[in-house]
Amino acid sequence: MTPRKELFITIKEALSTLPTLELVDLQRRQFANPKENFPSYFTAALIEIKSIRWGMMVEQKQEGRATVDIVFCCKDGWMNQFNGTTDEQDGLIEIDVIDSIVEKLQELRGISFKPLDLTDEEALDMEGEMMSYKISFSTSIYRLVNPKYSKQKIGFQTQIP
C-alpha cells in the first residue's frame, strides 16, 4: 500500500467511529451543488491530502511533509443557527463535532507516517455550498523508491598456465 493510501485509509477508519458523521470520504466537492440539490448526507468529514513535499534520504527512502485537510460539512451550519436549526444546543453541536474530529486525529499515526499534528482551523465560506469548516494537520511521511543500482555478485576465474 502506498503511503498516501495508508494515510487516507487510517484517517477514514478513525473518523468512521464518530457516530455523528454520516459520511467520511475523499474530498470530491460532493457539496458543490446548488442548495436545492444537496446530497442526502448532511454531516460529513471529507479528507483531502493537500500536498506532500518530498526530499531524498539514504538507502532508497524518501521523506516528505504532508498536509491533510478535513473539511467538516454540516446541515445546521453555525452561521445560520438562528434560522431553525434542529439541535437543542442552539445550533452549536458543530463545535462538539469539530472537537471530536480533532481528538480522533491528533497524534494518529501509521506505518508510513508519523503522528498527525493540528496546524490550523478555519470556517470556510464557499458560495453555493453547505456551511463547512476546515481542520488542517501535518505529518512526516515516508516511502521507498526504486534503487538506482542493483547488487550483483562478481566472480573471478583463475587460469592455470
Image (cartoon, grey):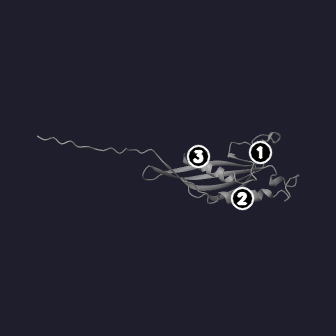
Which type of secondary structure does the marked residue at label 2 adopt?
helix
Coordinates of residue 21 in the picture (x, y in percent): 74, 51
Is 43 above or below relative to 106? above
Q: Earlier in the sequence, mark 2 or mark 3?
A: 3
**Residue under the point 45% across and 53% down:** 57
At label 1, which amino acid type do we have? Tyr
Which type of secondary structure does the marked residue at label 1 adopt?
loop
**Residue under the point 44% across and 49% down:** 60
Which type of secondary structure does the marked residue at label 3 adopt?
helix
Q: Earlier in the sequence, mark 2 or mark 1?
A: 1
Mark 2 to mark 1 CA distance (whole Å): 19 Å
* Side of 143 where 123 appears, left or right: right
Q: Which image quadrant: the N terminus?
A: top right
Q: Which residue is mark 2?
A: 100
Q: Residues within 10 Å of mark 1 (few under 14, many from 20)?
A: some
Q: Residues within 10 Å of mark 3 (few under 14, many from 20)?
A: few
Disc 2, disc 1: CB below 8 Å? no
Is 44 above or below relative to 107? above
Coordinates of residue 32 in the picture (x, y in percent): 75, 42
Residue 5's mark?
3
Q: Which residue is mark 1?
A: 41
Name the one closer to the observer, 131 or 11.
11
* Side of 76 where 46 appears, left or right: left
Q: Which image quadrant: the C terminus?
A: top left
At label 3, which amino acid type do we have? Lys
Q: Quadrant of residue 101?
A: bottom right
**Residue under the point 84% across and 52% down:** 80
Q: Residues within 10 Å of mark 2 (few under 14, many from 20)?
A: some
At label 2, which amino acid type do we have? Ser
Coordinates of residue 86 in the picture (x, y in percent): 86, 53
Total marks drawn?
Answer: 3
